Structures are given as C-alpha cells and as structure tokens.
Amino acid sequence: MDLRVLTATSPLSGTVRVPGDKSVSHRSVLFAAMARGVSRPTGVLDSADVRASIAAVRALGARVEITAERDGVLDLEIAGWGERGPQPPDGTIDCGNSGTTARLLTGILAGWPIEVTLAGDESLSARPMGRVTAPLSEMGARFATAEGGRLPLRISGGGLCGIDYASPVASAQVKSAVLLAGVRAEGTTSVTEPAPSRDHTERLLPAFGVPVATDPAACRASVTGPAPLHAYGVAVPGDPSSAAFFVTAALLVPGSEVTLPDVCLNPTRVGFLRVLERMGADLTVAGGTAIGTEPVGTIVARYTPELRPTTITAGEVPSLVDEIPVLALLATRARGVTCFTGVAELRVKESDRLEAIAHALAAFGADVRTGPDWLEVSGPTVLTGATVASLGDHRLAMAWAIAGLAASGATTVAGFEATDVSYPGFLGDLNALGAGIAGS
C-alpha cells in the first residue's frame, strides 16, 4: 500500500490511547506459556508481531484463547505448559518479522530436551542470531543455523548450566534470552551489559514467581534455576514507542496539542522524552501510577516552532533506539547540528534503519550525514514532500507519514502496510486527531 500524505492544514488536537506496549505484550504471552496454571493478560497489543508469539506458543502446546478484542488490544487466557515443558511442534515455527519472538523463544526452548526450528520472513532472516546463540551455546544448548548464524535456526536444548555472561551489546532481547534460559539452567545465570537496556523481563519475571537479582549500577541481572513460573495476569500499559509518533506530530504541526494517557514511563524506555526536554520541546509528563509491573503516566505534547540541537550519546541509545527515526526528523527543526552517536545497532533492525533514515530525510530536503555508527542532522530545514519507502520497516512507515504532515506539498510512503507489525490502527488514530490522510 502506498500512502499519500498532504501538508497538515489544521492543528492536530485530541487524545489518543495508544495500544499496548509491544515488548510487554510479547513477554506476557511467552511467560504465561512457560507458567503453571492459567494466566489472563489484558491490554495485549494486537499486531502481526505479537500474533507471531501467540501462534508460536500454541504450536508448542500452550492453550491460548482470545477473550476480548477492542481498540487494537487483546485480552487473553493462556494455559501454560508448566513443568511438563513445551511439546515438539508439528513443523517449523514461523516468527514472521518479530525479532523478539525469535530471540526470546530461542532462550526459552534452549532449556528443554526437544528440537525446534524457528524461521522468519526475509527481513528477520537477515538479522543476526549469533548474539543469542553464542551465550546459549556456552550454557549447553546446540544450534544449527543458516549461513552467517541467521534464521532458519534449529534448537536442540536441555541440560543447561548457568553462566556469567558479559554481553558485548546492550540488548534487551539478548539479555532476556539468556535469563530465560537461566530459568531452566542449574545454578545462577548472570548477564552484564555495557549500558542499561529495557528491563521488562526483570520486572515481570518476579510477578510470575521467579526472583531476579539486579545491580543497576553494574547493568547486571541474575536468575537462579531451575525455577518454575506460576500464572500471573499481566496488565499491559500503552506503548511509549507508539506514543512517540504522536508526540512528534504535535511538535511539528502548527497549533497542535495531543494528549496520550496511560503510557508506559519505564525509565529504560523514555530516553526520547529526556532528549526532547533538552531540545526545548513543549511537553508535560505526569506520572505517579502503575499498570501491572510498569510505571505509567500522561504525556501532553504541543507545537514547538523551534528546537535546540543536542547530542545523543551511545549510552542513551538503548533507551530510545526505536525513536531515532522521529528524533532525526525533529532534528530538522533544530537550529544547529544534532548528533547521534553509537547507533550501529540501527543497521541490524528491520532494515538498515540508519542508512534508510539518512536517505529519506535527504529526499525531504534535510541536511543529513551518516557514518558506520553515527548520524548528523543540521537545521532548521523546510521540508518538502517526497516519495519515500518503508523498506518493510514499521517505524519508518509511521515516521515518514508524520514527516509528510510537516512537509510542503505531497508525500508518498511506499509500503505503508508495514505498520501492521506494531500498530495496525495507526492511521485511524492519526486521522482522529485531524490529520485528514485519505489512504492509498
């Protein structure tokens, strides 16, 4: 689907309740499948990625029923496999486009004496799995992969021993895979990262009955196994990465004010808000409550005609890695040079996201430069409509739709259907604020 976007002619105004957080939704499904008893997660994101996790655990013997569907979220009832373990599936498990499904499931299955093959779409099959299989191999699991350590991946699990793993990258997917394998391993399994990554696994495992020892100063988390999981009803908060697109739209479109309630404000997820505060964005963030294991609050974003440039450091990147496309777009509004450093991880996302950002922003007329692990945007720039491609990347599809509202003239976003991966209702919610985008 090609989406045609015209310059916004009126302010964006109103309230959007973004759907459930994708990271927490995946974990609510996967952990419930591992647990003894019946879990009832609520507010689970209804997207292609999360549906891949649901289909995977069903294939492995968990019973999953959808008890309600509303506003882009699902309520589920999941009877887990508990101590009996997952059953061998009838065939290959298709993880679709979901790196979280593939990597976390690799850690979960590594602890059981069965053989399972995981596959994915073309994009996922190009993403690295060695960063997960290397530590799991140290623990005793065995793997066969496609060339370059990529999917399809065959797992032969069981008989794991705990390890003390120093991860070379700050990645919640790597950390979670190792900790989930550690739940089944003998002894203590620890993961130390070079910078803090998302901590949803560390917050949620204790709710399922598995203690997690953390040392935030050392970026270290540990579990001691074997440890059974018990059923828990996860309540999933709103996704801050989805909220970031509406924040960006409000900041860019003159006269706009957008309110986003019940958004997850986990400190490991809202680095983009801290950056926007430095840039002088007109934001109000009110927290103080919780949904399930996560802090939540309301974000109000208002049109900001000029922003300040800033430098995003490598240590900040894990807390805002999914928001770099919109932060780079907002940098075109800043007077000076905004620098993104230590962003090589973007090259192994759903696309080479770093190169894609630079190419698309240049098409909009921005002054942008990139290198192996850095990006620079000089501003302010008056954007002009362009034809850009999502490259099958959901976050790029949404970012360029927002750019089209701020650019003069017409913009075409090719492959806009990529938004189904994380936010199928994105266009409808954007139009509810007054965007007036007609569709293909």
Image (cartoon, rainbow, N blue to C red):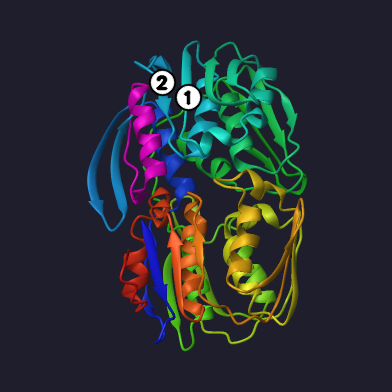
Q: Is residue 288 visible?
A: no
Asked if residue 43 is among those painted magenta in the image, a careful observer would answer yes
Marker disc for residue 158: none
Check the image and report above or below for 68 versus 338.
above
Q: Is residue 236 visible?
A: yes
* Distance from Cα at disc 2 to Cα at disc 1: 6 Å
Asked if residue 230 is among those painted magenta in the image, a careful observer would answer no
- Which amino acid type is shown beneath numbered disc 1? Leu
Q: Residues within 10 Å of mark 2 (few under 14, many from 20)?
A: some
Residue position for label 1: 118
Disc with the residue nearer the chain's start (2 vs 1): 2
Taking depth in this image into account, of 179 and 172 the one nearest to the observer is 172
* Residue 78 location, quadrant: top left
Q: Quick one: SS at disc 2?
A: loop
Determine whether label 2 and label 1 are within 8 Å by CB: yes
Taking depth in this image into account, of 82 and 94 the one nearest to the observer is 94
Q: Quarter holding the C terminus?
A: bottom left
Taking depth in this image into account, of 440 and 418 the one nearest to the observer is 440
Q: Quick one: SS at disc 1?
A: strand
Check the image and report above or below for 131 versus 74.
above
Check the image and report above or below for 110 versus 237.
above
Left or right of 372, for residue 95: left
Q: Position of residue 211 (x, y in %)?
A: 57, 34
Residue at screen point 63% across, 85% down: 306
Q: Position of residue 407 (x, y in %)?
A: 51, 78
Q: Residues within 10 Å of mark 1 (few under 14, many from 20)?
A: many
Residue at screen point 70% across, 34% down: 191
Residues shaded magenta: 37-61
- Which amino acid type is shown beneath numbered disc 2? Thr
Residue position for label 2: 92
Residue at screen point 52% across, 84% down: 303
Taking depth in this image into account, of 230 and 285 the one nearest to the observer is 285
